[in-house]
């Protein structure tokens, strides 16, 4: 009589569940021992029952098996992490290479090269892109020219103001010169009416010559042979 397959699911009856646990646990322990002996393998088995009771088996030492398991797990994790990082960077390199090829193709198309493989739609899109780029370039150029014109206008206005200030100063100096000229003429008239006269102190005399520049002249003091001063300084004003 053929034995039917048992459905692998939780056994509801507690007695049947405990009997099945005991039988299968012993069978699993036996298989672990046989595997360790027959295949010269390090085998460690740990079982906790539903009541929390511990059953274990180790072909050598459970502590050494656990340490070896941890180390192998860490090495495996590191290896998987390194492999994942390598694959990640490989994908990144491939993506960057593809982007570089696309940029190079686009640059050649913008320069009007290698257009034979493009369709009508591609050429229309390229034409629109060039028109937009040209519009941006022209806008930037106009902005720069406008800024330069504004700067030149500002400098011209500044120069104009400085020129106006200089013109005012020149006008003021001219007026002062005219006033001084009028005073000199008045002084000349008074001297002409009174004639040449000596100033009480020293020998200050006013000379008048036609068409000669106006100047002040300070005469050196007279000295005798023995170095004694015999005359006061003479200041002469020549008026024309």
Image: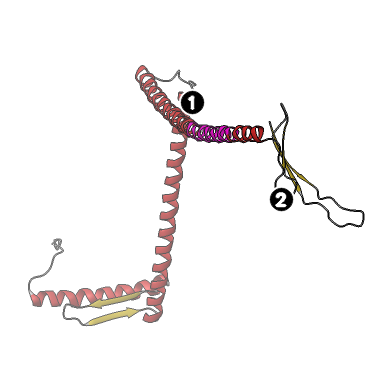
N-term mark: 2 or 1? 1
Residue 73 position, x and y percent, is 39, 68
212 or 15: which is nearer to us? 212
Local secondary structure at mark 1: helix
Residue picked out by circle 1: 108
Residue picked out by circle 2: 201
- Residue 172 drawn in magenta: yes
Say above or below: 192 vs 7.
above
222 or 56: which is nearer to us? 222
Say above or below: 193 vs 84.
above
Say above or below: 239 vs 235.
above
Residue 41 in sight here: no
Residue 86 position, x and y percent, is 45, 52
Query: For residue 7, what is the image quadrant?
Result: bottom left
Please, which residue is most extreme toward the left here?
13
Residue 22 in sight here: yes
Residue 16 position, x and y percent, is 10, 75
> Secondary structure of the magenta portion, mostly?
helix
What stretch of residues is rendered in magenta?
Answer: 160-182
- Decide if residue 198 is on the left or right side of residue 15: right
- Decide if residue 149 is on the left or right side of residue 30: right
């Amino acid at each position: 009589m053929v034995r039917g397959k048992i459905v692998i699911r939780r056994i509801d009856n507690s007695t049947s569940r405990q009997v099945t646990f005991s039988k299968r646990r012993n069978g699993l322990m036996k298989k672990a021992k046989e595997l360790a002996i027959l295949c010269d393998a390090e085998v460690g088995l740990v079982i906790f029952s539903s009541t929390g009771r511990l059953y274990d088996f180790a072909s050598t030492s459970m502590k050494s098996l656990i340490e070896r398991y941890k180390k192998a797990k860490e090495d495996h994790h590191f290896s998987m992490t390194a492999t994942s990082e390598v694959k990640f960077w490989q994908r990144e390199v491939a993506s960057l290479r593809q982007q570089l090829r696309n940029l190079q193709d686009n640059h050649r198309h913008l320069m009007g090269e290698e257009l034979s493989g493009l369709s009508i739609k591609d050429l229309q899109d390229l034409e629109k892109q060039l028109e937009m780029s040209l519009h941006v370039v022209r806008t930037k150029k106009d902005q720069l020219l406008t800024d330069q014109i504004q700067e030149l206008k500002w400098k011209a206005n500044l120069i104009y103001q400085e020129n106006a200030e200089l013109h005012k100063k020149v006008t003021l100096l001219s007026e002062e010169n005219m006033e001084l000229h009028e005073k000199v003429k008045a002084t000349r008239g008074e001297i002409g009416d009174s004639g040449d006269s000596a100033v009480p102190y020293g020998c200050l005399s006013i000379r008048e010559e036609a068409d000669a520049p106006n100047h002040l002249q300070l005469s050196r003091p007279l000295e005798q042979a023995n170095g004694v001063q015999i005359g006061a300084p003479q200041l002469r004003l020549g008026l024309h």
